[in-house]
Amino acid sequence: MNMLMKSNISSLRTVRLFFCLMMLLLFSAILNAAPPVPKNCRQMILVITPSPDDFQGKLYRFQRSANDSDWQPVSGENPVVVGKKGLGWGIGLHSQSIPKMPVKREGDGKSPAGVFKLSAVFGFAPSEKMRDLKMPYLHVSKALECVDDVRSRFYNRMIYRDKADSVDWHSSEKMRKIGAKYELGVFVDHNAAMAKPGAGSCIFLHIWGGVDDPTIGCTAMPREKMQTIVRWLDADKQPVLVQLTNALYQQFKTPWHLPESM
């Protein structure tokens, strides 16, 4: 083996070692960062899937009485479906990168993984019939749309078309036309603050079409479970969605102070 070949092999090994070291440092920084679940959060929906590629998962609900108290289960496990392509690392209250995890993109068929605020409920019922909710509520009229046009200044926002000062989007989810799946749902604050174009939009908890019917990026469940959740959620308790693979849950459970799922 000549000297040039030996030098190239040595350089390649050095690059690989450097890359592995950087990935280790990045992952260590994520684990040691401040827990992304806010201290004033007292309601949590935890969704766990077997792997990044699975679209079936389990949902658990937890609550706590004070900022430093232990999480207590509200219900047992319930089946859910996520995106048809599984999970991708999203933009929320957590770190925005993680080794060996695909990143959530617009139109990729993945649901976001991470920690996200739950900000509002939406549904077909008129607002006057939903006054007992403890969350902000949006009536899904024919005019309500969720904008997924990355060039629009309304990207990743639900907006009533007839109330917009200008319509600058060419693509949106017309909520009422989706039908029964959007009869009741919750807006997930993925990529919500200063929305990054192309990072994913219009992510909800909503009613499913069945255990074998994945979404294109949302998290869906049976109608009766969705009804229970929207009446349980309380904006004053700063509810969040934590959505992870089982492996990530096991890694983040202690540093993020997550509840036991089983």
Image (cartoon, rainbow, N blue to C red):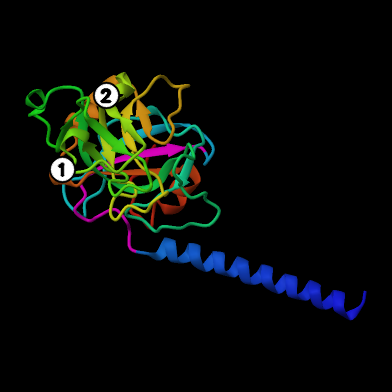
Q: Secondary structure at mark 2?
A: helix
Q: Quadrant of residue 149?
A: top left
How packed mark 2 is, by other alpha carbons closer than 10 Å (few <14, some 14-19, many 20 or more), is some
Q: Label 1, on which residue?
A: 235
234 is higher (above) or lower (below) than 78: below
Closer to the camera, 18 or 122? 122
Mark 2–mark 1 Cα distance, whole angstroms, equals 25 Å
Q: Is residue 110 left or right of residue 7?
A: left
Q: Label 2, on which residue?
A: 176
212 is higher (above) or lower (below) than 102: above
Q: Secondary structure at mark 1?
A: helix
Q: Which residues are magenta?
A: 34-50
Which amino acid type corresponds to the residue marked 2 in the rendered image? Arg
Q: Quadrant of residue 256?
A: bottom left
Residue 151 placed where, x, y %? 37, 48
Of the numbered discs 2 and 1, the one sitting upstream in the chain is: 2
Q: Are marks 2 and 1 in contact (CB under 8 Å)?
A: no
